[in-house]
Image (cartoon, rainbow, N blue to C red):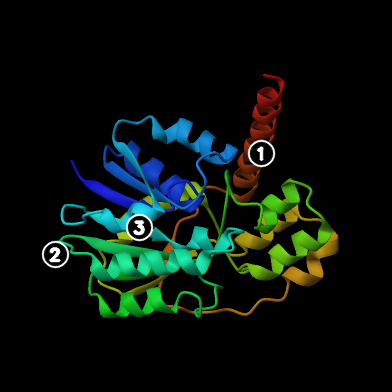
Amino acid sequence: MQTSVVIGAYQFVGFHLAKYLLDQGEEVLGVDWEDMSEESIEDKEMEIGRNSNFLYIPIHKLKYLSLEKQKNIYVSCYDLSKSKRDNQAEIIKVIAAFLKDSHLSKESHIIMLMPIEEERSMYQALLQKAEEMSTVKVVFLPTVYGPWQPETMSFEAAIRKKAPSEVEKAIEAEDRLDALFVADLPKVLVELASRDEKNIQVQSEASNQWLECAQLVLEDAYTGIYKECSRKQRGMIYTIQNKTAPADGITMQQKHFRRWQLLKKWRELE
């Protein structure tokens, strides 16, 4: 049985990736930096944590993890960048030290998931380490949406009826040229792990995916903000099919939030 490591397994992209790998019959070592008492973490643990092929490892114990027998190591800097944590730089140092001291087999790969719009300065240590290691590749992602999208991102902020200033901040911080539904992504990430390219930029086959999503969930007052966005190219363009239409994806994200709100109310009544 193959074993993969997912750093950020209880986040957004990392969670969906870990779930996909488990569904494929793999063993998954899930590493995360969140407090396990958080409600959202508890709900995710209910979904994947009880799987006998899943083992959780807190981020501070990452240095003790042996990688000699692991197939792929996925590092979701995408999720870290979207979090509200004040200690992001500290977590990056832990991951960089882990990569530096790792001993991988020739068949293993490290796949770093990065947001395409992210400034490189905070992640420079990781990106520099990626350049030095032949086993590391960096996959740049556009806006990813769907169930469990963090509230720091615009669609979820709008769904949760956040203050206009928070929604505007989220819009300005993310890639507004493309969007991918999160469940369409894991299979692609597994395929990319074995490619030769060091820097890969994932993009939709269909055009205007972010705009189509925005028109479904964002109010007209925000249109002046999200029409302004510069195109960036971070690596080899890898185009993927959009299996989930924006209308379907946004509907699933909205339904997920409503279900989660009901669960919270039921817990408060206990």
Instruction: Give residue 177's mark.
Output: none
On the image, numbered disc 1 is attached to which residue? 257
User: In percent of the image, x 73 and y 72: which residue is there?
Assistant: 227
Image side of residue 50 versus residue 134, left or right? right
Q: Is residue 202 visible?
A: no
Amino acid of disc 2: Lys
Query: Label 2, label 1: how many angstroms apart (C-alpha)?
Result: 42 Å
In the rendered image, the quadrant that contains the C terminus is top right
Image side of residue 153 versus residue 201, left or right? right
Label located before the other in sequence (1 or 3): 3
Image side of residue 160 versus residue 236, left or right? right
Crowd rating for badge 2 (residues with CA inside 10 Å; few <14, some 14–19, many 20+): few
Q: Is residue 31 visible?
A: yes
Residue sitting nearer the eye, 245 or 233:
233
Amino acid of disc 3: Tyr
Instruction: Give residue 106's mark.
Output: 2
User: In percent of the image, x 22 and y 74: which residue is there?
Assistant: 134
Instruction: Give residue 74's mark.
Output: 3
Instruction: Single out the residue that lies furthest toward the right.
Output: 221
167 is higher (above) or lower (below) than 233: above
